[in-house]
Image (cartoon, helix red, strand yellow):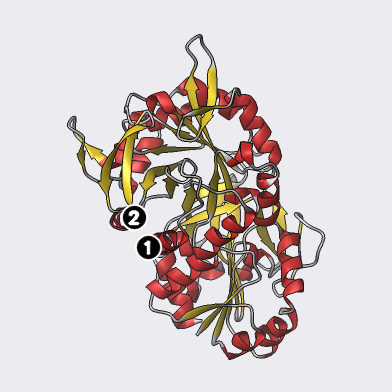
Amino acid sequence: MIAIVDIGIGNLGAIKNMLRKVGAQAEITDSAEAIKAADKIVLPGVGAFDHGMGALAASGLMDTLNEQVLNAGKPILGICLGAQMLGRRSEEGSLPGLGWIDMDVVRFPRDAGIKIPHMGWNTVAPTMPGGRIHPLFAGGEDTPRFYFVHSFHFECDRPEDVTATCVYGKSFAAAVARGNIWGVQFHPEKSHRFGAALLRSFAEHA
Amino acid sequence: MNLPRVIPVLLLRGRGLYKTIKFKDPVYVGDPMNTVRLFNEKEANEIVVLDIGATVENRGPNFEFLEDLASECFMPFAYGGGITTVDQIKRLFFLGAEKAVINAAAFDQPGLIEDAARQFGSQSIVASIDVKKKMLGGYDVFTHNGTKGRGRKPTELARELENRGVGEILINTIDRDGTMSGYDLDLIGDVAAAVSVPVVACGGASGPSDFRAAINAGAAAVSAGAYFVFQGKHRAVLISYPSEDELNSIFTPEE
C-alpha cells in the first residue's frame, strides 16, 4: 500500500488515479497510523512553499514522517512542492523545509528571457554523474517528457543527488534522490505514459 | 525542449459534449468519457472542460460526473463552469483536476480569486475572458455564455485579474468560436502584452498555421474546440490531435 499524504495542498485524486492505473494500491490519508502501516509514501503538493510547510506542521504528521522516512527508511516520493519541501529552505518562503536532502529551492532568474512559471511539457535527461540511471527512470524511455508547473527549482549541494535534469533557460535539476528519499519537480500523475512508467518504477522498485 | 501547449477545449452540457458556433447552436460531438480517453491515447498536452450549462442554470459543478472524468484524465485537467466558492475548487483538486477556470465568478464573487490563489497557488487558477467585438469598434467582455455584457476592456480586465491572483488567462473570442476563421491576433497580442502570466489563445483556430500565429502574437499556449472534434467541410465528428512530431514541426522554425 502506498500512502498519499493529505495535508490539504495537492491534486491528490490525480496521483491516486495514476497509481491505480499502473496497478499499485494507494490510498489518500491524513492518518499517522496509515502512514506507518504503508509500504511507501507519496508527498504531493502544489502552491506556495510556506503554505505547504505550514500545512505539514498543522497536520501533526511531521514526527511520523521523520520517523518513517529517516529511521525506518521507508521510500518516499515528493512531487512538485512536495519534492521542494524535502530540501532545507526555499527562496519562496521563510519556513524551514524538511531538510532531508541537502538542497535549497531557488527562483528561476527573472531576466533570462523565459516566461515564469515554467508551465507545460518538457523533455528530461535522466542521467546521473557517471552515466547511471536512477531506478525511478529505469523503466521509462531515454528522453521522457513530463508536465511541469513551477517558478522555483532545486539546487543540490551534491551533484550525485540529481537524478534528472531539464533545460528551461538553463539546465536545472528536475529530479533528486538521496537513499530512500526521492523527489520530482514535474507531475508524473499528469504525464501520460511517461508518468505512468515513472510511478510504476516507484511502486515496484523503490 | 519546451513547446507551447496545444489544448483541446471541450464543452460539457449535461453528460454530453457539444460544440457551439459563436457560443450558440450547440451540436452534439460525443460522450465525454470516450472523448477524454481518445485525447489520452493521443497524448494531448492538457485538456480544458467547460460546463456551459452550469452558470446559466445557476448551479455548481457536477462533481460525481467530474470525478469519473478525472479518473480517465492522465494529462493536466482544467475545469470551468459554475464555480463560485473556494470549497468547490478544493473539491475539484481533490478529485483529480489541477486547474479551476473562473469566468462569471470573477465579477460576481468578490474575493474568490484572491482566496483561491492564496490557498492553492496562482498556477491553479485560470481566468477565462469571453470577448465580443463592439459594433463601433473596441471590445466588450461577456459572461453567462456570451449573454451578459460587462462593459470592460479585455486588456484592463486581464491586468486586474492578474493582480488579483490568476496564474493564467484563457482569452476566447465569441465572434470566432466554432468558425475556424483564425484567432483574433490583435486581441491576443494586446492581452498578452498587458499581463505577464501565460495567455492561452482560444476561438477560431483552424489548424497549425493559426497556432503558430497566436504564439507569434504573444500567446504562451493555444487552444481549440472545433479543430479537434470536426473533420472536413461538412464538420463530421472525428477526434484528432497532432502527434509529437507534428507539434515539433508546428513550433520549430524551419532551418
Residue A72 shows in the view: yes
In the drawing, does residue B106 fall left or right of residue A206? right
Q: Mark 1, chain letter?
A: B
Location of residue A172 (image quadrant):
bottom right
Residue at the farthest right position: A94
Say which of B140 and B218 sits in front. Answer: B140
Q: Which residue is mark 2?
A: B36
Question: Residue type at mark 1?
Answer: Glu
Question: Which residue is drawn at the image coordinates 36% and 25% (left, top)?
Answer: B182
- Earlier in the chain: of badge 2 and badge 1, it is 2
Q: Mark 2, chain letter?
A: B
Q: Secondary structure at mark 2?
A: helix
Question: Which residue is drawn at the image coordinates 38% and 78% (left, top)?
Answer: A23
Q: Which mark is residue A189?
A: none
Say which of B51 and A1 sits in front. Answer: B51
Q: Position of residue A38 (x, y in %)?
A: 56, 87
Residues at marks 2 and 1, CA–CA distance in whole angstroms: 7 Å
Residue B180 vertical placement versus A156 (above, below): above
Residue A143 shows in the view: no
Location of residue B113 (image quadrant):
top right
Q: Position of residue B115 (x, y in %)?
A: 70, 50
Q: Secondary structure at mark 1?
A: loop
**Both marks 2 and 1 on one chain:** yes
Q: Are marks 2 and 1 in contact (CB under 8 Å)?
A: yes
Q: Position of residue A28 (x, y in %)?
A: 55, 76
Q: Which residue is mark 1?
A: B72
Say which of B56 and B16 sits in front. Answer: B56
Question: Which residue is drawn at the image coordinates 67% and 64% (left, top)?
Answer: A84
In the drawing, does residue B130 fall left or right of residue B225? right
